[in-house]
Image: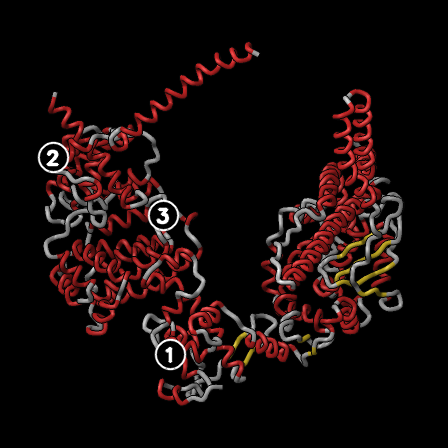
Amino acid sequence: MGATLRAVRALVLLAGFYLLGVILLAALAGADYLLYLHAPSGVALKLYVVSVLLALPLIRGLFMLRTPKGEERPGLAVTDADEPALWRTVRELADQVGTRAPTRILLTPEVNAAVSEDARLLGLLPGPRRLYLGVPLLQGLTEAQLRGVLAHELGHYSNSDTRLAAITARGRAQVLRTIDTFEERADKTAGREQARQEKKNAKAAAKGKKTKEIDTRHSGFTYRLMARIYVAYAHLYFRATLAGSRREEYAADAAAARIAGRDATASALREIPALSAAFGFYMNSYATLGSEARLLPPRGEFFGGFGRMLTARQLELVGLRSDLPSEPSSPYDSHPPIADRVARIEALPADGRADEARGAALTLLADPERTLAELEDAVLTDDVLRFARAADWQELLDGSMAANFVSADTALHRALAMYTKEHPSLRGLLKVIDDGQLWQLARRLPVSDQAAEAKGRAFREFVRPALADGLQTMVLAELSAHSRLRWEFSWADAAMVHLPSAPDGSEADLGAAIGAAVADHPDTGPLRALLPSAPQGPAARETDAPR
Amino acid sequence: MTVLLWILAVLAVPTLLIGLWLAGVFLKEFFRPSGGDADPDAAEALGLLPAERQNTKYAGPLPTGVDATLAAVRGGDWKAAAKLLHDIGRDWDRRSWATGLLGGIAADDDEWLLAWEADRPDDPDAAVVRARSTVILGGQMRGAKRATYTTGEQFAGFHRMLERSREEIARAAALNPDDPTPYVTEITVALGLGYPHAEMDRLWTEITARAPHHYEAHYMALQYWCAKWRGSEKLATDFAERAAANAPLGSLLTVLPLIAHFEHDQSDDSEVDRTPRMIGRVDAGLADAAAADQTHPRLPELRHLLAYYLALQNRDAAALEQFRLVDGHVNALPWRYRGSEEEMAAFYCRIRNASAQAVAAESAD
């Protein structure tokens, strides 16, 4: 099948997507007409009712097809005046690819770059274009690599492959967005129903009546049904156009390699999955570290820290780069597996451009620090922006850890509360251990079936890790409450905790002390020695005033 | 309408007949004496025990006095355990066998062992029991199911215990340099932690330098070389054949080729158990058993396997002879691999009864 023929087929399938509802309605009407002609009126009447019931969701579905204009994703819009170098690069690339430059550039906090177009007339006519550019890409890629990524994205809109390729790509985006909207609306309907039922239950409960179980399975049903029909059709559409889309991806890669250089394009593709993993890790372990304590890193550092972490963890990135995903990321993804794309680009003849533009892509920004700070304002929610700002990362770590320990609630806390009917505290736990009740307490921990069945030593060995973990959390919380812990912040490693050193200057061995406290014959002595002003023995504990 | 009734009636007759036949089969099955297997009468007439009276803890009777010793140890008397090992002395086969029994008790409750260790801190006997009990405890935490049915927590516990036992094994070995028992214990660690073959060979040199024809060492090493653990059918068979060929008569190592065959036997019928090669292996086993020390604690294990394969080879008289020598205890291969204690005893009795019945039928003719 030639390229034009393939595009025509895609066009017909796209038309089918919009006509699906109309055709189904026509089929129903036709069936009713046949009934009117041939069936006895009693039977026909019942079937009319059925067909009306069937028609309702279809009509509803037709209205759902009014796709909302693609809403602009959150990001920081930058004008030509803000970032002249970036705009110049993008225009230059669009020119080389042979397509229109975007009319807006938005910086986003994702490891992704995308060009989107608000196509008009159901995806047939071109509309305004936006470039979404992830700042983490700027932080992690060289300038040449970034040019490769941008050239690829712009390449999707070039007409070099076939005149109709652009239409296919636009249609694809439109169909995808439509089914996304279906799912979203169905969820919203279900959410409304849940809220309604909860309110009803609350009223019933207030009047002392029995409440009903909340069941939202039936709401959003027509939406879901229609969505299912359209999703099934969309699958067909995607499958039919997949081979073509793959070709376009490879063509866009080839264009990128031509414009940005073979090596830069291939290495950018290798880099993106690694950056993506690293960014996820950064957001979890660094940027949002203070969410419990309602603390933010210093202004500009929320996203800015990512660059520092990348520098410190270069060696880990090497490992991430070498194993490339060989599966497509989702069934809707038009991109071939990254491993294939890299292999194809690397198979191109060497172009001797390996040393071009090796500077960091972040230098394309006029004032990176200012931009990173403005990005925070643009994409973080107002609630988050009202968090206190830590003076530096060390302070953020200290504050977050202290807050985490204040609210620490492990299985051991709950078991202890159940066993002693008191507020769980380290003091209470040590008393239980000293009274020889550790293993009775351990029976209150949630354990697996195998551990629950085990007896004697086997049971103790099964639960010992959980006991040690819980106890360690409680001990660290206690030390933290007395400001006895010192946390060591590092971009390269996990945060390290330091205990106050023993009188002879050696580092306290918390592991050994905890091991002794949860041994078969527990001894809390070593642990008590580590604790601040801990009561040293049973006699001292008796006189200890309650806090 | 009547036509319809006629048609129904014609159809009903064969349906009714099938129903009656099924009911007959069901009733016949229901009232048949126990399970449709060989009649237990023939076996029990010879004084052999019914399934519910078979001991499922041991492979054979414990030597006189040992039962009382074990009971005393369970009651907390560590001196009884110390005396048992002291009396055995340098009989390495018996030492590892007794260590296994004591280690099993300590895996459930080690208060007596702690008392022993407190009283005699550097007693090599206590050290070897300690190491053995940790390995057994690991095995209990893992459970006996295949890897797919074993949870991550169970594996973690198993590996933690095996890791811990390595230190204890090294200590026991250092306290009694002549003793192969700590190294024999280490084979289980090799199995569980997946020692590379090179490491296993190193361990094996340590063992054979101390006890060249040690029963339990060979039994456990064969497990290591089996396909289900760290080897293959070929490695296991080669190991078993070589060890059996080099061992003196009466060392009981003729059991190894039988075990290697049993561990890798995937067939549904007993043709593979009747080959001239298997008959030769069984004959070698019979000669070995006859020449062995009749009080050897491992002799019943060989006899159980001999009885099983003799029965499969239709040598029922010889099979029955072995069954009579071991009857009363069934915790041995091949019965041991059945899921529960009841199934273990039931499997044993099924094969035994078939042989007894065949022998009875022959003598009646």
Say which mark, if any, is on residue A524.
1
Q: Identify the residue at image location x=73%, y=71%.
A: A383
Marks 1/2: CA distance?
63 Å
Please, which chain is the residue tagged with disc 2 on?
B
**Numbered disc in front, either 1 or 2:** 2
Marks 2/3: CA distance?
40 Å
Looking at the image, is A78 positioned above or below residue A152?
below
Marks 3/1: CA distance?
41 Å
Q: Identify the residue at image location x=39%, y=47%.
A: B146
> Which of these two is toward me, A478 or A356?
A478
Same chain for marks 2 and 3?
yes
Query: Which amino acid lies under the numbered mark 2 shown in the image of this protein?
Result: Leu
Please, which chain is the residue tagged with disc 1 on?
A
Q: Position of residue B138 (x, y in %)?
A: 34, 58
Query: Which amino acid lies under the numbered mark 1 shown in the image of this protein?
Result: Thr
Same chain for marks 1 and 2?
no
Query: Which amino acid lies under the numbered mark 3 shown in the image of this protein?
Result: Trp
Q: Position of residue A331 (x, y in %)?
A: 68, 44
Q: Which residue is mark 3?
A: B229
Q: Position of residue B273 (x, y in %)?
A: 26, 31
> Which of these two is toward me, A259 or A104?
A104
